[in-house]
Image: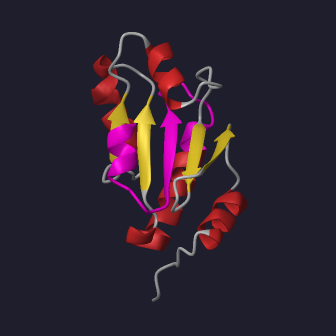
Amino acid sequence: MDKILSAREGRPFILVFWNLDCQYCPTELKMLNKLKKHYKKELDVVLVATDTIDDVPQLIARVKSYGMHKIEQWVFANSMPERLRFEVDKSWYGEVPRTHFYNQAHERIVKTGLVDQKFVEKWLADNKLEPNRH
């Protein structure tokens, strides 16, 4: 987490925890990809898969099918995922999608379950992220 946060110091971004078995993750990731295209570099999205290192080939294929293969991706690399979840958020028990919306000061809003596009658009506006001009 420290690497992800420090690389984005002073910048808002969205951090999405997901996995291969998640029912709602495809919908959310496709929606974020659509917004990412509309906002280009303004919208920074990072994906963290809660699957294992052994699942990397499937994770890459799945993310590519969502059109998000150019987005920074991480995967849980600890045999004790509970430890990693606790490090991320002490109140998190592993349910996905779990999406963290970080503002410029890295204060976060955490949403569990499918996030509504209107919420994301409001967050983008609140953080003064502008869509591409055509």
Looking at the image, which residue is at 39% across and 57% down?
9
Q: Is residue 110 visible?
A: yes
Count the marks. 0
Horizontal side of residue 7 vs 109, given as left or right: left
Instruction: Please state the horizontal and vertical placement of residue 94, each as a whole percent of the image.
Output: 58, 22
Q: Is residue 70 above or below residue 21?
A: below
Magenta stretch containing residue 18, yes or no? yes
Horizontal side of residue 11 vs 74, given as left or right: right
Magenta stretch?
Answer: 1-27
Q: In which quarter of the image is residue 114?
A: top right
Q: Which residue lies furthest to the top in this view?
A: 79
**Residue 108 or 55: which is nearer the viewer?**
108
Looking at the image, which residue is at 50% across and 14% down?
82
Instruction: Please state the horizontal and vertical placement of residue 42, each as a whole percent of the image.
Output: 44, 70
Looking at the image, which residue is at 35% across and 52% down?
71
Looking at the image, which residue is at 53% across and 56% down?
32
Q: In this view, does 133 lie above or below 121?
A: below
Magenta stretch containing residue 100, yes or no? no
Horizontal side of residue 103 vs 81, given as left or right: right
Q: In this view, does 119 lie above or below 4?
A: below
Q: Quadrant of residue 10?
A: bottom left
Q: Is residue 64 visible?
A: no
Q: In which quarter of the image is residue 47?
A: top left
